[in-house]
Image (cartoon, rainbow, N blue to C red):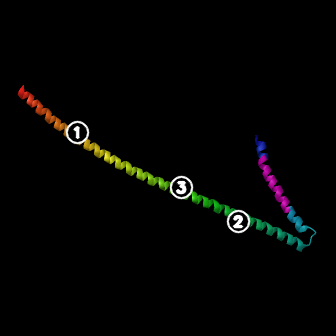
Amino acid sequence: MDTDTTQRDGHSGVILCSFLFGAAAGSAVALLLAPARGEETRSRLKTTVQERRDRAAQAIERGREAGREVVGRARTHVKDQAQHASRALAEGKTALADIRERSEQALKNVRQEVTDAVEDAKTASKDVRSVAKAAIKKG
C-alpha cells in the first residue's frame, strides 16, 4: 500500500466517527426542537435515557460475572498446578533419598570387598613366603 492510501484509511475512521456523532447530536436536537409538547419530549428522552442506563448496567453486570468466572477458573488452575508441583517435588525428594541410601550401601559393599581383597592378598602373600622359604630350605 502507498502512504496516501494508508493516510486516507486512517482518516476514514475519524470521519465516520465524526459523522455518527453529528447524526446523534442532530437527532437529540431534533427531538428537543420537534413540534411535540415539551412534556412528551422530556418523557421520551427520560425513557430513552433510562433504557440506555439499564442496558449499560446489564452489560456491566455481565462483564463482572465474566470476570469473576475467569478469576475462578484461573484460581482453580493455579491451585491444580501448585498441587501437581508439590507432588512432583515430594516424589523427587523420595527418589533422591532412595538413590542416596542405595549409593551409601553400594559404597559400604565396595569398601568391604576391598578390605576382604586386601586381607586375602596378605594371606596369600604369607602363604607364598612360606612356600618360598620351604623351597629355599629344601633346595
Q: Quadrant of residue 131?
A: top left
The image quadrant where one finds the C terminus is top left
The residue that appears at 21% across and 39% down in the rendered structure is 118
Q: CA distance from mark 3 to mark 1?
A: 53 Å
Check the image and report above or below for 122 versus 51.
above
Task: Return the mark for residue 63.
Answer: none
Q: Amino acid at mark 3?
A: Gln
Q: Quadrant of residue 90?
A: bottom left
Classed neighbour count for the residue bearing mark 1: other residues with Cα under 10 Å, few (<14), some (14–19), many (≥20): few
The residue that appears at 79% across and 66% down in the rendered structure is 52
The residue where tag 3 is placed is: 81
The residue that appears at 90% across and 67% down in the rendered structure is 33
The residue where tag 1 is placed is: 117
Reply yes or no: does residue 15 show up in magenta.
yes
The image quadrant where one finds the N terminus is top right
Classed neighbour count for the residue bearing mark 2: other residues with Cα under 10 Å, few (<14), some (14–19), many (≥20): few
**Residue segment shown in magenta:** 9-25
The residue where tag 2 is placed is: 61
Query: In this image, 59 relative to 74: left or right?
Result: right
Query: In this image, 91 relative to 15: left or right?
Result: left
Q: CA distance from mark 2 to mark 1?
A: 83 Å
Percent x, y of residue 136: 8, 28
Q: Amino acid at mark 2?
A: Glu
Going from the N terminus, do you reach mark 2 or mark 3 first?
2
